[in-house]
Each structure stands twice: as C-alpha cells, then as structure tokens.
Image: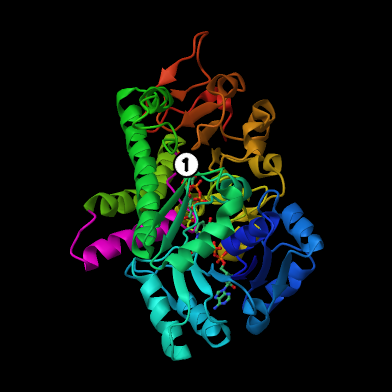
C-alpha cells in the first residue's frame, strides 16, 4: 500500500521506516526542511538503536522516501498518518497546534476516500476535531479519520513496533477499519488487534501511560518506605511482581519518570479529568510526587555526602533513560539544576545525550567525554541513567579518581558488594547504604536524611 507519514520525529521516522520494512511504500513529510534534507542522505537527526540501519535499508529499497512537499507526500496514498508533536500547554492541556496545522496542510491535497490516521498522542475528541478542520477546508467530508495510538518506547522503538503487545485501531467507519486492517495485516499474527472507536482509542493511549506512570511512582514511594524501615525494594518488587495480576514491569524505582511522554501525558489526562468534572486524583498525586522527586534526591546527595558549596559532583547520565539521546523532562537534568543551585560544581557525562543536554544546561555544568574524567577529583558521584557503560564501570578506578567516597546509584545498577570492595560508600534507591568501613560482613547503614559520618580513611580534604 502507499502511505504518507506527517512528521519525521521519533515516532514518524520509526513507524515510517517500520511500515516500509513491512512492505508498504511510505513517504515521510516534515515541515523542517533541514531535517528532510538530512534524512534523504540517510543521516538521522535522533539516536535510536538500529534505526539508522533500517532507514538506510528501506531508503535503498525505494519503499521509504522523504519530502518537504505536502502534495507529493499525500498524492495517491490510501492513508496519511499524523505523527507530529503534542506538547503540554501551561495548564496541562495538550497543545494541538501541530495537529491542526497538519490537518490544514493535508486538507487541500487529499485524494477522496483517504484515511487520515492520528498516531500522535492526543486528547479524547481530537479525531472529531481533525474531521471538522479537514471537512471545512475541503467543503466536503469525502475522507475518513481514524486513531492508531503508538506504544513504542524510545530505545527499543523498532522491536516495540514490530512486536507490540497489542495494536489499537480506532475508527468510526468500516471503510477506515478495512484500510487499517490491510496496513497492519503483516503484524496480524504477531499481536492481538483491539478494534474500537476513535474516542476509545484516544482514551486507551492516555490511560495506559497514566497507569504506567502510576506504577513507577508507586515503586518510588515503596522505595522511600524501604529506606525508612530497612527494607530492600528490589526484593519486595521481585516478590510482588510475581503476582500475575500485578506484574514485575515498570516497578523499578529510580529518580522519577521523565521523557517527552509520561510527564505530558499524565498532565493531559489529569487536565481532561478536571475539565470534564471527572477528577483523576490518583494521577494528580502521581504528577506532584514525581515533580518533587529530583529535588528530594538532590537533598539526599547534599545531606548524605555532607557536601558544601564549591564541592564537585559527577553526574553520570542525563538522558531520561538508557539507549536514547533524549533529555526532555529528564529527572537527571533537574538534579543537575538543583545541585548547581546549591553551589555544587557538576561534572556531566552521558554516552549519547550530551549534545542535547548541553543545549539546555550550557555553561551551568562542566562536560566530560568519558566517565573517568568526569569522576576525577569529585566529592561524590551519581549514576542517574541506567546506561550499560555505567553498569560496567570499573569501581576501583572510579574510587581512585574520586576525591570523596560517596556513590549514589539512583538506578540500582551496580553491585553493592563491588562498590564496598572498591572502598566506596554506596547509596542506592530503597536499599541499605553500604559503607566501605565494614569489617568482614557487609554492614548496612540505615540513613534517613541524615549526614553519614564521613570516614577519615577517605582522605577528603
Ligand atoms: P518529535 O518532536 O520527535 O517529532 C515531531 C515532528 O513533527 C518534528 O520533526 C516536527 O518538525 C514535525 N512537525 C511539526 N509540525 C508539523 C507539521 N505541521 N507538518 C509536518 N511535520 C511537522 O515528536 P515525537 O516524539 O515523534 O512524538 C510525536 C507524537 O507521538 C506525540 O504526540 C507523542 O506524544 C507521541 N508518541 C511519542 C513516543 C515517543 O517515544 N517519542 C511514543 C509514542 C507516542
Ligand atoms: C513510554 C511508554 O513506555 C511507551 O509505551 C509509550 O509509547 C511512550 O511513553 C509514549 O507514549 O510516548 P518512553 O517514554 O520512551 O515510553 O520510555 P519508558 O521506558 O516508558 O520510560 C519512561 C520513564 O519512566 C523513564 O524516565 C524511565 O527511566 C522511567 N521508568 C520506567 C522507571 O523509572 N521505572 C520503570 O520501571 C520503568
């Protein structure tokens, strides 16, 4: 089938390339001309594992192409996907201006009977809004609008698209449903297909993201409780997650959820609830707790490492999670801001996200191309993103490079015993702090907000 994709961001680019890999002919259009020019050379504007190879392959096969001409993009296509951005407005509502602009662009050039498929994450009712915009501009409603929310995650986008847990097809006309079925026919045996109305499809996407954010927030609060009472959040979640009604995934505590989706989508979900008089108090509370978390963890670093103005901290990882260069609403970036506000010099390293982070933090922090350089001479270190590079960190070398002893692992990534043997005071999330001054057996020091006595052997100036 011949398809068009409006928007060449994380979602448009990945799903466009994946649909081409499934055998369709896909033309991707973006208003950012430089992005289109770059993509035509198979140079990717984003980092996503495996995407460069897939784009290169599908471009070479002729099934994927890029254009900055809307007429050329949607000529003779059976469906036009909209995958433009849907950021937050100040009150939490979704800013639909990119969707509206895309609808206006499409309207004048659309062939009759084409299906407009909304892939962006939108508020309930947006399919109806797009239908109105396009019908008004065309002076007739000779087209269909469908909703096909996307559930891929950055970092595993290709496999998430190719092997999804389910495919959600929202349509209000059978003809639109038939076109969607034909598009997804190659994946029909791979994943269950949920067919529903456009409104339910829109609601499904926001509900799923709100629930996942709630799971993470719950795990973070349980971790706080474990810290306070001497529990081990990993052990608790392993056991809790064995209950098939609960499940183990998305119960990993950390510095809070970030990224371009959960924060904005929870805000939008809560906003819809408020505006429709169906308050989503659970999610309102999740949002408030998550916003507060980086500041809470920053206070913990300052207090437990006994830091003073002018001290230095290495911050390993600024991407909102591993395997992406995305720093949007990254909790780690907030931690950097909180620490600098407290007069701490922050040494930042990230394997992929430094160019994006540098555009935001600029000269507020110092940038290092490798983790050992970032650790050199610091009074404390923080692992904030779960990159494999940090999982494999040579802790003995790290300890030698550092001036202080305190290592904060906000992803529970490292082995406490190895940290202890390296001579570090190892703080993690929802588990005992492990002090290197142990005598034989591992000694756990329960530390709740207090400053740990700084070991003289650490040789801190
Ligand atoms: P993005 O910011 O990476 O990309 C958006 C692209 O749309 C940009 O290239 C921009 O230039 C282009 N654009 C803006 N207005 C346009 C217009 N009028 N015509 C053509 N192109 C236009 O955004 P993204 O991360 O790909 O997200 C897109 C949507 O998908 C959002 O609604 C998001 O919530 C949703 N989503 C994102 C993910 C994810 O992991 N990033 C996953 C699922 C769903
Ligand atoms: C998320 C959803 O997982 C996707 O299904 C969805 O399509 C996407 O949002 C979207 O709507 O755009 P993504 O934001 O790429 O995907 O990343 P996740 O892997 O979900 O992680 C989101 C945040 O939660 C990250 O900051 C991550 O570190 C954090 N997280 C995740 C935890 O703290 N603990 C966990 O157990 C899982």
In the displayed structure, 28 sits above or below 220; it is: below
Segment tinted magenta in the rendering: 254-280
- Identified at 35% across, 32% down, the residue is 246
Q: Residue 270 magenta-drawn?
A: yes
Residue 269 occupies quadrant: bottom left
In front here: 270 or 76? 76
Q: Label 1 belongs to which residue?
A: 307
Q: Is mark 1 within 8 Å of ligand 2?
A: no
In front here: 274 or 368? 274
Q: Residue 385 magenta-drawn?
A: no
> In the rendering, at what x and y percent does residue 447 appear?
37, 28
Quadrant field for ligand 1: bottom right
> In the rendering, at what x and y percent does residue 281 appear?
22, 53
Check the picture and name the quadrant holding the N terminus: bottom right
Q: Is residue 347 visible?
A: no
Residue 276 occupies quadrant: bottom left
> In the rendering, at what x and y percent does residue 51 appear?
69, 54
In the displayed structure, 143 sits above or below 121; it is: below
- Most distant residue in the left direction: 277
- Identified at 45% across, 15% down, the residue is 443
> In the rendering, at what x and y percent does residue 278 appear?
19, 60
Question: Mark 1: few, some, or many residues within 10 Å (few <14, many ≥20)?
Answer: some
Report the side of 432 relative to 369 (left or right).
left
């Amino acid at each position: 089938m011949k398809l068009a994709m409006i928007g060449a961001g994380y979602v448009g680019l990945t799903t466009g390339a994946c649909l081409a890999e499934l055998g369709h002919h896909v033309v991707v259009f973006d208003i950012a001309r430089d992005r289109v020019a770059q993509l035509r050379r198979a140079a990717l504007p984003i980092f996503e594992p495996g995407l460069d190879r897939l784009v290169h392959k599908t471009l070479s096969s002729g099934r994927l192409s890029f254009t900055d001409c809307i007429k050329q993009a949607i000529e003779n296509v059976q469906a036009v996907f909209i995958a433009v951005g849907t950021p937050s407005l100040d009150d939490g509502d979704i800013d639909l201006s990119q969707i509206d602009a895309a609808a206006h662009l499409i309207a004048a050039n659309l062939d009759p009977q084409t299906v407009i498929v909304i892939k962006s994450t939108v508020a309930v009712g947006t399919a109806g809004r797009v239908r109105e915009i396009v019908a008004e501009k065309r002076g007739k409603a000779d087209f269909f609008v469908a909703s096909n929310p996307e559930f891929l995650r950055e970092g595993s986008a290709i496999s998430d698209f190719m092997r999804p847990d389910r495919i959600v097809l929202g349509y209000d006309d059978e003809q639109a449903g038939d076109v969607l079925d034909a598009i997804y026919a190659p994946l029909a045996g791979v994943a269950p297909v949920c067919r529903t109305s456009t409104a339910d499809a829109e609601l499904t996407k926001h509900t799923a993201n709100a629930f996942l954010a709630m799971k993470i927030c719950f795990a973070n609060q349980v971790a706080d409780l474990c810290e306070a009472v001497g529990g081990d959040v990993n052990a608790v979640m392993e056991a809790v997650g064995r209950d098939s009604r609960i499940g183990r995934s998305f119960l990993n505590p950390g510095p809070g959820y970030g990224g371009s989706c959960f924060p904005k989508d929870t805000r939008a979900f809560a906003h819809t609830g408020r505006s429709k008089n169906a308050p989503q108090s659970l999610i309102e509370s999740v949002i408030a707790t998550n916003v507060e978390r980086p500041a809470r963890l920053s206070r913990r670093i300052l207090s437990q490492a006994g830091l003073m103005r002018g001290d230095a901290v290495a911050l390993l990882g600024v991407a909102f999670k591993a395997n992406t260069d995305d720093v949007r609403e990254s909790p780690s970036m907030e931690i950097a801001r909180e620490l600098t506000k407290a007069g701490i010099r922050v040494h930042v390293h990230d394997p992929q996200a430094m160019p994006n982070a540098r555009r935001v933090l600029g000269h507020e922090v110092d940038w290092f191309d490798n983790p050992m350089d970032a650790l050199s001479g610091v009074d404390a270190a923080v692992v904030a993103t779960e990159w494999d590079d940090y999982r494999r960190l040579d802790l003995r070398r790290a300890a030698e490079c550092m001036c202080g002893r305190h290592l904060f692992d906000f992803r529970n990534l490292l082995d406490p015993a190895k940290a202890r043997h390296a001579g570090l005071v190892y703080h993690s999330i929802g588990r005992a702090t492990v002090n290197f001054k142990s005598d034989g057996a591992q000694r756990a020091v329960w530390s709740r907000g207090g400053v740990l006595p700084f070991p003289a052997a650490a040789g801190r100036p």
